[in-house]
Amino acid sequence: MLHFPILTVIIFVPILGSFLPLAHSRDPVVARWSSLAVTLVEMALVGSLFFLDLTPHASPQGTWLLLEEYSWIASFGAKYSLGLDGISLVLITLTAFINIFCVLISWRAIEEKVGSFFFFILFLEGTLMGLFLANDLLLFYLFWEIQLIPMFFLVGIWGHENRIHAAIKFILYTLTGSLLMLLALIAIYIMHGHQTGVYTFNLYQLMHTRFSFTIEVLLFLAFFLSFAIKIPLIPVHTWLPDTHTEAPTAGSVDLAGLLLKTGIYGLFRFAIPLFPNATKFFGPMLLALGLGGLFYAAWVALTQTDIKRLVAYSSISHMGLMVVGIAIWNPIAVSGALLQMVNHGISTSALFIMVGMLDERVHSRDFAVMGGLWGRMPVFSAFFLLFALSSLGLPGLNNFVGEVLILIGTFQAKPVIAILGFCGIVFGVIYILRMVQDSLFGEPRSEHDLWDLDGREILMLAALALAVLFIGLHPTPVLHLLEHPVATMLQQTQQVALQGM
Amino acid sequence: MPNDWLVILPLLSLAAGGTAVFGAGAFWRSRPRELLFALSLITVAAAGAAVVLVAPQAASFSGVLDLGSYSRFFNFLFLAITGLTLLFVRHYARERGFAGDELYGLLLFAALGMALLAVARHWLIFFLGLELLSLSLYVLIAIRKGDAGSNEAGVKYFILGAVASAFLTFGIALLYAATGSLDIGASLGAELQPGALPLLMAALSLILVGVGFKISLVPFHLWTPDVYQGAPAPVTAFLSAGSKVALFAALLRFSLDLGPAAWSYALPAIWVLAVLTMVVGNITALRQTQVKRLLAYSSVAQMGYLLMALVAVKEGGAPALMFFLAVYAVMDLGAFGIVGTLSGTAADRDALENYRGLGYSQPWRAAVLAVCLISLAGLPPTAGFMGKLVLFKVVLQAHYRVLPVIGILTVIISIYYYIKVVIALYLQPRAAGTAVPRAEPSGVLAVAVILVLLLWLGLLPGSVLNLVSRIAG
């Protein structure tokens, strides 16, 4: 075991580092560079985990590569308990990676209140790290709710015209879900305490709580609602397009790349393991909602005239397929869904970043003023095409691997669902192609003074493109990281489900 | 048991300090403001030291006073509230010309009244404390003599407070008639005589109504927004944090004393009042456009959450209530106190529009105000989150199902109006309005203390939670 509390450091470097840009509010240059430094240090810290030669070892608190546990609120039995396994390692790497781009994309786009902007970005990064690492339910919940506050300000202060409305909608939707989850969380804690005499918020101990079926269903629904709003699943998805439309680019990147993932992550890590029988009961509903989202959002995306809204709906559509993968709950589908979280994080972030770049140039996101970019901004267009193709699942690029794994896993369990899922993906091709056609090709529809990408922008997109190609051509290292924790999780859930019968 | 004067040292020092302030005010013709302020602060500090240092003693003065650890906790809390109020009011009162002996003296006597409420084991002491507190507050609310709103608020609070006192007195009289005892524990915990039941119920209802007025439970809350709006902001802070916490501390003690039979009759009433208070308080707050009124309704709603957890008091809910009372005191004191420091001398900063853009022109005070609001809304990482967590935990633990669900739904409703103020502070462009007074040292100190307390209780509440469960257990 490592004695250096590296996971704690990973959480608190961005949280404490966020005060650097805030302290330099008067000097935007220092604020920008210090934020970039913090995200790079964070990336280095997370990267160092790969060189530690960690091996999973089992403990009463689950199987972890690294476990850090300190007492927190003794009278509740709540512990400050962080666990790192392959899944959280993949997700915190994604978080650290994406946040570098959040800082870079805002370099010129954010000119007002620069210090506070980077404060919120870094603070959000820290809370996301905590969320992906916490294995104590109360700690998880704490990070789950805190992350809403920086996001609220990011949308509300630096957003577009209707930003206040969007920010209110965002916070009311997400809090409604999470407050009901809080109640359910306390209920499990109390029931576990009554049954065993041990009052704890530790996930792996709470998994052995026994519920009557009705109670389990109610508790599952409370958790599920909270995660479903965050994912978002239809019909509680309506906050997302509005929030995306109004959010600044970095906010959209954080939101699509990371915040939505917390919903799937919560479903996978908490809701299903805690309530396996209720999950089984609601399995068809999960599949239906996932597939419904896949088709419905793709269809709505097709009718959008705002390119950012289109990408937002494409997010909802992709998240639907991930929910299908999680709901199938076999190793292949789940690994596929988890890998897809990373893929979607990279590709959609890249698309949002590029939409942001376009917005900086033409000051509009309407297809009516685009077209013909291929001739005028060749480098931009090449990257845009690459990420669009990755998003529609072209073989050799990242999304293909995830989608195929989800479909294979699903086919093993429920062939019909797999076929429907496949149709949904094909359906998705239509709106992506339409987006590419309307923006890159055809006659230019406006006389804007366009300039192609500069060095900073090319650097960012090249890094993302490398990630796209890496996962697309050689996904084994990532899948290898996911393999063991997924197997352990599935096996544990199986046991819990049998106990509960 | 011999009378142990040492035990009541906190009470004695408050009384002596209050008298000294009045004496000093009478002695010097020009009012020695700084001396009065210093004298009051020293009194509070001395009383606080006495609270901490003197060993608690459960029953003293023939069982009339209880200076055990429960009273000790609350006395410390009251002194902290008074101390913070003094810091908030110092500059505010000086700018508006009411920083006289009556202000400081009455604040100290009000603190004494609150302390008496917490230590009382005899109905007469309780009544004495209540009247001492109320009389001081009547004057404090109307202390801006030239200000019509302040005077109106004072009269309103006086009339309704007098009615509430009448209810309470009658209730106490009936309780005495039913049980033959004026000892609080004995009269409430008495075995029920079959014939005495109606009398006892009538007595308890009247006492509940009286206390309900003071802590503004729905439907006895109608005075709250008017009085909170009219009173000078630091006095409102003191009124909402101090007097409500003191009366709730007494109500908590009554509930613990109540015999099982009487408690089973009281429960449904508390349930209904809790739901009414949470729902009406939060929904009415949604429509407010004046910050002080909004905070007034918010404080009504917060009382609703406390009352919700009161149903679980016999199943070990007392520590949670004590913790939340402390949290509530800090956040309400902070919210109203900061409103005071942001206000110009003509009138308090009240309209929501006047808060627009303050987040950028007054970053520190606005940030702490935002933290107070986030805490009132019950979001982490603030104290309000931990407070709500422990409240909902004890209610669920006592096997209530519907009540906590209603409670959490009203919490969701409440997010909207708290966020509305945060939006004004940070998301809306600066409105042309009255100038904001500069921050001054005592106010800055108070604001900093509030911020530290809110984050400390929100992130590392372990030590305080241990303390309250040890006291209650």
Image (tube, coloured by chain):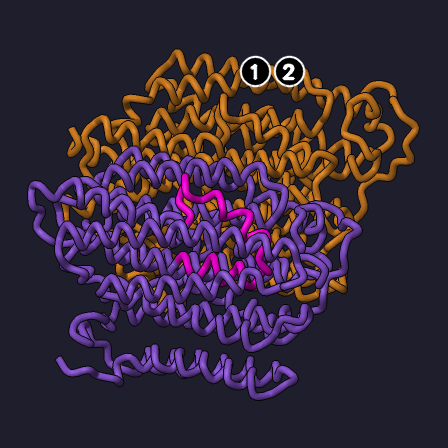
Query: Can residue A263 be spotted in the picture?
Result: no
Viewport quadrant of the N terminus of chain B: bottom left
Residue type of the residue flagged with mark 1: Val
Query: Can residue A297 be spotted in the picture?
Result: yes
Q: Which color has been applied to chain B in this rendered view?
A: purple
- Where residue B449 appears, as percent x and y from the top left, is 51, 70
Q: Which residues are magenta?
A: B216-244
Viewport quadrant of the C terminus of chain B: bottom left
Residue B152 drawn in magenta: no
SS for callout 1: helix
Subunit bearing disc 1: A
Q: Nearer the viewer, residue B205 or B368?
A: B205
The residue that appears at 43% across and 72% down in the rendered structure is B109
Q: Which residue is mark 2?
A: A430
Q: Which residue is mark 1?
A: A426
Q: Nearer the viewer, residue B54 or A17?
A: B54
